[in-house]
Image (spheres, rainbow, N blue to C red):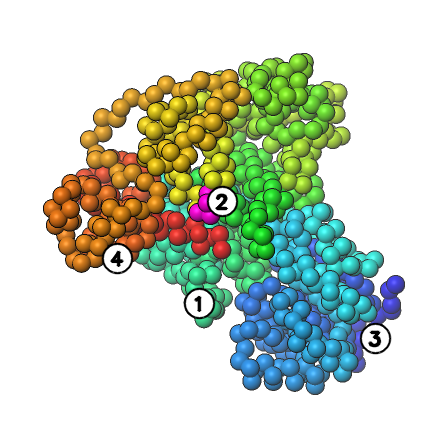
Amino acid sequence: MTTAAPPLPAGFADLEAALKHYYGYETFRPGQRDIIEAAMAGRDELIIMPTGGGKSLCFQLPALLKPGVMVVVSPLIALMQDQVESLQENGVAATFLNSSLAAEEARARQNDLLDGKVKLLYVAPERLLNPTFLTLLDEVAEQVGVSAFAIDEAHCLSEWGHDFRPEYRQLNRIRQRYPYVPCMALTATATERVREDIMAQLQLREPLVHVASFNRTNLYYEVRPKDRNAYGGLLALVKKHKEGSAIVYCLSRKSVDETASRLQQDGINALPYHAGMSDRARAQNQTRFIRDDVQVMVATVAFGMGINKPDVRLVVHYDLPRNIEGYYQESGRAGRDGDPAHCTLFFNPGDLKRIEWIIDQKVDPQTGEPLEHEQRIARQQLRQVVDYAESTTCRRTIQLRYFGEQFGGNCEQCDNCCHPQPIEDWTIEAQKFLSCVARCKERFGMAHIIDVLRGSKNKRVKQYGHQELSTHGIGKDRTVDQWRLLGRSLLHQNLLGETQDGYPVLKLNEGSWEILRQQRKVDVAVPRELNVVDTAASASRQEAEQLFDRLRRLRKTLADEQRIAPYMVFADSSLRQMAQKRPQSLIAFGNISGVGNRKLEQYGDRFIATIRDYCEEMGLEAASPEPETTNSAPRAPRRRGALGNTHFATLALFQEGHSLQDIAEQREIKPRTVLNHIASLIEEGQIKQREGLLEEEAFEAICLAMGEVGDAMLGTIYAHLQERYDYDDIIVARAFWRHEQKQAIGLAAQ
């Protein structure tokens, strides 16, 4: 039940007068006045308004005009401090309570609350639900009054949102404790499913729901390949936008530090920001960025939530984001002032493995069991990001469709619209594709539909009898990548639907039937490299990738059983060789690089069984053995699982200060064996100091080379360095590099 809005305080003839008084604006932005009127009348509200749309004013102005204190729930200390400082600069009585305050300062702020000196109180959800704080809030409610609860970043409430936080789920306890206090939920991004979840979780009563357009017309979107020239592209972008601020997002802390350091070396004023830094260092770097003391902030996605810096001209995602919603919100921190801004995503399919590893770590904190539901949703969201990055369709169309908003036409503000690929008429192919979806009863995802179209007789196709369908094999003339391009294009053009519950099942819609009835034409932008016939080589690569993914899942299962990290079972390089060679005997499996006697005994049977099952399903035989390499480079140290007594005997002598040659002579083993021991000890973190093993200049040069050509082949690294460093240096440097990589992956998952 709604109530009449309270009268405005003396001195304000209308809401516009209050807006001018507190904020200096003459008029409201679209939608703001209706939202504020509803808040003044005490209605519950759900506000979806993109970054830069004026969301904060929607709860701040009612807080200033209504009696009592408005409690604002904010997820990050940096976020609330930034907003409170900004409000105080405007003369608004706002404060926050969090763990950064000394006890004496916290008591002073609590007294101000009880004395009615505060209009906006910012708190984190954890503090709000603390029994001691609730007791204080009861006193405030009785003595001063609570005008409303404003739940900022409300997408955190929903498991379907891009930044789900379990502590947010408990906020419904506040509604139960203070049923008479209205509640306003606000976020920049939320799909329809997320909106429904937010309203249910907060028990909103007949709320006003306002969903603003997600179209940020001033932003230019582009995707670039993340190849060996990617850093040069990043540097050029930063220099091009040197008149404004820039944010560069990276996936891991290590990547943040390395990228910030490289930019600094190239004369760019850049700072890092990630959770591995102290609170003080992060706060200092954030302040310097906001105050334009530095141009570039290189950060993990923890940075930027609610940061009120309107003049960011460039946002770069140097690593792949985890979902469309997060990418939209992070890139949306550009151009909040409405002026043109640039958003670039560097795409490398290799980033997928790191994110998939992070997804695999989603476990129940109580039982340690995998959270399969959350993992499934996260994997579907990640696939949508890949679809976005690889798409030839208008970027803006894809983003807006994700949020349920239709966009009709060329945006002229993205790379695909400004530099379009050749357009081809694929109506016949679309009819084949959609007909196959229909004949499969709209119960399967894209991969299965493509298998049927291309005439596969794998186990799943036979299980459902789909080899008998009339559409089986009618698409053999197109490659898997071409069919996938068409499927994505149909989804992006809203000519095909897909469920969003973690099981991406294709569904026909009105547009689909128009195509099937020959009432609509389908045009597809086709990259030139896809206009080729299928080859045995491309089919072989696809089969190897599918088997590789299956072997990765087996590795994860084995690692979980032993409570060890997956890389301790087998490295990715070993799994890829298994996927390529498909060994089906213990002898053949033992010839795989990285398979020693112990691992052969431990894991051989289970991996061989998986490979055999896959080959049987796909009708494959073992691949032909690869020819012996003629590379003159020495063999790299082969991983043998856990370190043995022989490694620790070498370690003891090394720690006593003996040289590698001395150790070889004392132990009566070859110097190369000693070097391999040292490399294994470094990889396992037993040796951490490079002093005495490797010059710093050599380490940095070799790491730079591995960053460009990978760390798989010693000969490749040696050649890339133009033979300036010997193989011993490369082996030692690579061991330190790999240890740091493992640490970075672990930190990224925290």
Task: Nearest to the eye among marks 2 and 1: give it.
Answer: 2
Secondary structure found at label 2: helix
Task: Nearest to the eye among marks 2 and 3: give it.
Answer: 2
Secondary structure found at label 1: loop
- The residue that disc 3 covers is 7
Q: Does the magenta stretch include residue 90?
A: no
Q: Which amino acid does label 2 sit on?
A: Asp
Q: In which quarter of the image is residue 172?
A: bottom right
- Where residue 278 is drawn, which disc sits there? 1
Per the model, the C-alpha gap separating discs 2 and 3 is 62 Å
Position in image of residue 189 (x %, y %):
65, 52
Secondary structure found at label 4: loop
- Quarter of the image for the N terminus: give it: bottom right
- The residue that disc 2 covers is 560
**Is residue 591 shown left or right of residue 558?**
left
Which stretch is magenta?
559-564
Per the model, the C-alpha gap separating discs 2 and 1 is 32 Å
Instruction: Kindly identify the residue that appears in the image at 71 percent across and 27 percent down.
Output: 442
Position in image of residue 682 (x %, y %):
29, 50
